Amino acid sequence: MATVRIPTPLRVLTGGEDQVQASGDTVKDVIEALEKNHPGMRERLLDDKGVRRFVNIYVGDEDIRFLDGLATPLKSTDEISIVPAIAGG
Amino acid sequence: MSTSSPERGALQNKSALLVGVGGLGCPAALALVEAGVGRLVLCDDDRVEESNLHRQILFSEADVGHDKLVAAERALYRAGARPGSIELVHSRLLPENARALVRGVDVVLEGADNFATKFLCADACFLEQRSVVHGAAVRLCATVLCVAAIGAPCYRCLFEDLPTGASPNCAEAGVLGPVVGFAGALMADRALSVLLGDNSVYGALVSYDAKADRARELQLLARAHCALCSSERSIDRITYDRYTAPSCAA
C-alpha cells in the first residue's frame, strides 16, 4: 500500500488524519481507493480534464506531470504527496 | 542565510516590497530590517484586529483598530530600521498599481490572503522581471516558493490559474501563529538569498507541516505550456478580468 500525505485543507475528508494508506497500481487507482474510503476526495483532486489545475500530486519528490500523470505506476513503498494551492497567513 | 558585514553593506542598497503585512509579512519585514535591507515598501490596506495579534508579531493590543501599516512602520523603526527606510502603500496590490510597485524594488515578498492577489503578483513580477517569494499558510501547513525574475518555474507553473468551483483550500480558515512565523522567516531568508545573488533558491518549493514537524523542499520544473513564463505564454499584460475569482482568506 502506498502512503498518501494529506494536506491540511483535505483532512476534513480523512477525519483529521494527516496520512492514510491506499492501495493501487497507479496514482489514479490510489485516488479511487481514497474516494472509496474518504468520499469527496476525487472531486477535490480531479476534474474532467484530470488533476485540477490548482493541485499538484507528487510521488516521492517527482511531480506526476513529469512522470506518467495519473497513470504513473506505484510501488508499495511509494509516498504520495498532495500539494494544493493555499492562500492565507 | 546568515549575513556577514560585507553582506549587510550590500543589502543597504537593496529594496524589497512586502505584499500583505499580516502573519507572513510581519516576521518577514522584521527579518529584512534586522538583516540590513536598505528600503522596505509595505503594501496593505487593513486595520489591526484583535484576532491578528497571535500571529502578526509587529502589533500589540494598543494597535487594534489602527492602520496596520502605520503600526508596522512604528514597530520596525523600534526594531532598528534606518530612518526613512520604510515606505507605506495604503492599498492592496491591484491591477492598476501592481507593475509599478514591483518595478520599484529588487525583490518582492508576497504573503497575500487571496488567490487573486497571488496570481496578480506573480504576473506583475514576471512582466517586470522581478524575483518574487510567494508564501502561504493555512492552519498547520505552509508553503514558500521562490521564483526567479525569468520564471521557469513560476507560480503559474505550479498552479496554472485561480481556483474555481470546489477549491480544496477555502474550507477551514485559521492559522497557527508559529506556522506563519516559520513561513514568514523563510520568505525573508529566500529574499535575502535573492538580494545577495544566490540563484540556488529559485524554483524551490518548501512545504512545512507543523503537525508532523516536517519541512520538505521540492525542486519544481517549468511547465512546458505555462501561460506566463513559457515560450508559448499568453499573459503579456495585466487585465482585471484575469483576477476576479473569489478570495480565500484562510
Image (tube, rainbow, N blue to C red):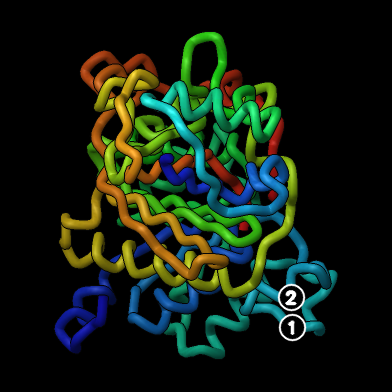
Viewer-nearest residue: B244 or B168: B168
Badge 1 marks a residue whose secondary structure is loop
Q: Position of residue A69 (x, y in %)?
A: 34, 21
Viewer-nearest residue: B197 or B94: B197
Q: Residue furthest top?
A: A48
Q: Position of residue B187 (x, y in %)?
A: 41, 63
Residue B108 seen in the current view:
no
Q: Which residue appears at 72% of the width and 45% of the height?
A: A12
Q: Position of residue A41 (x, y in %)?
A: 63, 30
**Disc 2: host chain:** B
Q: Which residue appears at 48% of the width and 29% of the height?
A: A30
Residue type indicated by callout 1: Ser
Q: Which residue appears at 36% of the width and 14% of the height?
A: B234
Badge 2 marks a residue whose secondary structure is loop
C-beta proximity under 8 Å, tags 1 and 2: yes
Side of B210 relative to B22 (left or right): left
**Disc 1: host chain:** B
> Which label belongs to residue B60?
1
Quadrant location of the N terminus of chain B in the rendered image: bottom left
Rate crowding at label 2 as few (under 14), some (14 to 19) or many (20 or more) other CA atoms within 10 Å. Answer: some
> Which label belongs to residue B53?
2
Depicted B159 relative to depicted B236: above or below: below
For discs 1 and 2, the disc positioned in front in the rendered view: 2
Q: Quadrant of residue B190?
A: bottom left
Rate crowding at label 1 as few (under 14), some (14 to 19) or many (20 or more) other CA atoms within 10 Å. Answer: some
Q: Position of residue B110 (x, y in %)?
A: 48, 52
Q: Quadrant of residue B21?
A: bottom right
Viewer-nearest residue: A20 or B63: A20
